[in-house]
Image: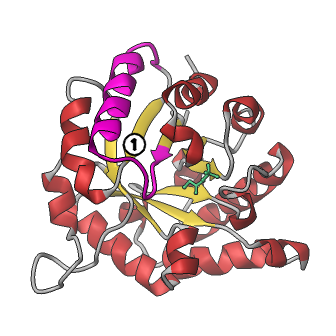
Amino acid sequence: MRTPLVAGNWKMNLQRTAAQDLAAGLAEQSGSFHGVEIAVFPPFVYLDVVHTALSGSSVRLGAQNVYWESPGAFTGEIAPEMLVDVGCRYVILGHSERRHILGETDADVFAKAKAALTAGLAPVICLGETLEQRESGQTQSVIETQFDGSIAELSADQFHQVTVAYEPVWAIGTGKNASPDQAEEVHADLRKLIANRYNAELAESTRILYGGSVKPGNAGDLLGQANVDGALVGGASLKLADFVAIIQAADSD
Ligand code: 13P
């Protein structure tokens, strides 16, 4: 049985007070949910204050990126050890905004995943096709290529700590979510890829999140799919009531 994970990717949003208030509100409400794990991913500079605001609650903390080197002369980068030091459990890797706006490659994502795992972080690795790729029938092959390049070289032991997130690029921030059937199809394919590369047991236990315009109004249908094990939420995670409604939709208790 996979415990669903609802993860709020705040992206480059909110400033100190708003970040603190949102985290404190979430910490307060999180006690009502027992069948779902909750995590938030604030910008680096607010990890510390959000960690403090979450203390005493079960809400987990994650970062939106990391560098693959240990501390040293890498101006502007953040080492995995530093994320652990400020209380992170998770790190998002390979988000499409990093792949498409910042030129991150599958090899970069893989290097970051390895370094994150070595430091004790659990990566949430994102995959997803563009609209053009979907419309030309390439969804499956794009997902497979990204899986091979950014995940498949991890050992089974390492992969054990990984959460996969399917985020179709055309659904991110557009208000146009994948239909539950479209999400389920890709999630089921991903589970097969995991079974083929690793084993059936790992495929069964791995959480595969859906991300892309998840809102209170569509969360129930998306999360009701057999292979959708939670949500990676952008815009709606910035509004406490909306995020809580999505958590409620995911709560299996
Ligand atoms: P939106 O929920 O704003 O579409 O963003 C999704 C996303 O990119 C989460 O990582």
Q: Is residue 87 left or right of residue 99?
A: left
Q: Is residue 108 left or right of residue 180?
A: left
| Count of picture labels | 1
Q: Residue at x 64, y 59 (%)?
A: 167
Closer to the camera in the image, 194 or 231: 231
Amino acid beneath label 1: Val
In the rendered image, the vertical position of residue 133 relative to residue 59, given as above or below: below
User: For the magenta stretch, what is the residue range?
Assistant: 8-34
Q: Residue at x 60, y 41 (%)?
A: 229
Closer to the camera in the image, 3 or 168: 168
Q: Is residue 67 magenta?
A: no
In the rendered image, residue 92, in percent from the top left (x then y), is placed at 42, 60
In the rendered image, residue 119, in percent from the top left (x then y), is placed at 20, 64
In the rendered image, the vertical position of residue 49 relative to residue 70, given as above or below: above
Closer to the camera in the image, 241 or 225: 241
On the question of residue 109 being in view, the answer is yes
- The residue at which mark 1 appears reads as 40
On the question of residue 152 being in view, the answer is no
Closer to the camera in the image, 237 or 88: 237
In the rendered image, residue 80, in percent from the top left (x then y), is placed at 22, 66
In the rendered image, the vertical position of residue 24 relative to residue 237, given as above or below: above
Q: Residue furthest top?
A: 32
- Quadrant holding the N terminus: top right
In the rendered image, the vertical position of residue 77 relative to residue 206, given as above or below: below
Q: Residue at x 42, y 65 (%)?
A: 156
In the rendered image, residue 211, in percent from the top left (x then y), is placed at 63, 51
Q: Is residue 19 magenta?
A: yes
- Quadrant holding the C terminus: top right
Label 1 Cα crowd, 10 Å radius (few <14 / some 14-19 / many 20+):
many
Q: How is the image coloured?
A: secondary structure
Q: Residue at x 73, y 32 (%)?
A: 224
Task: Find numbered disc 1 in the image and state the secondary structure of the residue it sits on.
Answer: strand
